[in-house]
Amino acid sequence: MADIITLRDAIARHVYDGDCIALEGFTHLIPTAAAHEIIRQGKKDLHLVRMTPDLVYDLLIGAGCARKLTFSWGGNPGVGSLHRLRDAVEKHWPQKLEISEHSHAAMANAYVAGASNLPFAVLRGYQGSDLVKVNPDIKFIECPFTGEKLAAIPSVRPDVTVIHAQKADRKGNVLIQGILGVQKEAALAAKRCIVTVEEIVDDLQAPMNACVLPTWAISAVCVVPGGAHPSYAHGYYERDNRFYQAWDPIARDRDTFTAWIDEYIRGTEDFAQYQAKVNGEAK
């Protein structure tokens, strides 16, 4: 049964230096609050995994938490580049970042293979792709039944996966609604799983065919209202487009970025205090 604890305790208990960690959520339900807490606690040497690295990984990379990134696309959606990611890859600031780039299809299959406790994923893909020239983890094998040439990549089996969801019940079962990326597969592939939620309820009232993660698959549930901001949470709040636009000039400059995280992340006790400060409500 999942423990219902604070996010601070969950990160301290389940995220260790050197871990392979996946923070997943596609378009919405991106676990921003968890990324902030990882920075507050000074976790380092992390192998970050995510299908679509955006602001959460720009933060973690720029804060010096990461040594490697496995991903399939990276950018500030609708705005442009991730400047902290580019600086780490191109100029090794604040430290060198190793990258392993894949296609979306390959990453999704790698999570499925990890959730199935398989060592690698097999897919039709990468034929003629230049990614093969720069990623040694992309191999080709021959199907033992048809002789067809297929691509193979290592499965993704994180030490810890972190996701955000709408709600959990008091036993720690979690309901995810709206667009589903690979949250379910990432959770099941991991040794440990932390879920931040908007609220705890007595009954999930899950509709037919809903995505419900069972409590036995989850290590910790943490109540963090608004914890996906600036992404949206279906049924709770909208995407904050202005924040994504404002992030571009903040992240472009090393000093501006560092001052921002020192004030708004390292200078706050938790995500609630961060929200109050960024909204100009902190006393």
Image (cartoon, rainbow, N blue to C red):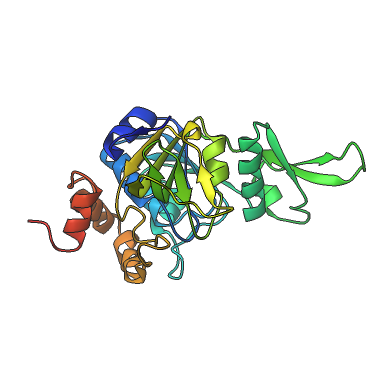
The residue sitting at the right extreme is: 146
Residue at 49% from the left image edge and 51% from the top image edge: 206
**Residue 178 position in % (x across, y down):** 50, 60
Q: Tell me the quarter of the picture where residue 2 sits.
A: top left
**Would you say residue 2 is visible in this rendering?**
yes
Of residue 206 and residue 126, the one placed in the foreground of this image is 206
Q: Quadrant of the C terminus?
A: bottom left
Vertical placement of residue 72 versus 141, above or below: below
Residue at 55% from the left image edge and 54% from the top image edge: 181
Give left or right: position of 66 versus 102: left
Of residue 158 and residue 48, the one placed in the foreground of this image is 158
Residue at 39% from the left image edge and 56% from the top image edge: 55
Residue at 25% from the left image edge and 51% from the top image edge: 261
Vertical placement of residue 41 versus 205, above or below: above
Q: Quadrant of the N terminus?
A: top left
Give left or right: position of 236 versus 50: left
**Residue 220 position in % (x across, y down):** 38, 34
**Residue 76 position in % (x across, y down):** 43, 63
Vertical placement of residue 43 versus 205, above or below: above
Of residue 98 and residue 160, the one placed in the foreground of this image is 160
Count of numbered tags = 0
**Residue 10 position in % (x across, y down):** 33, 34
**Would you say residue 155 is visible in this rendering?**
no
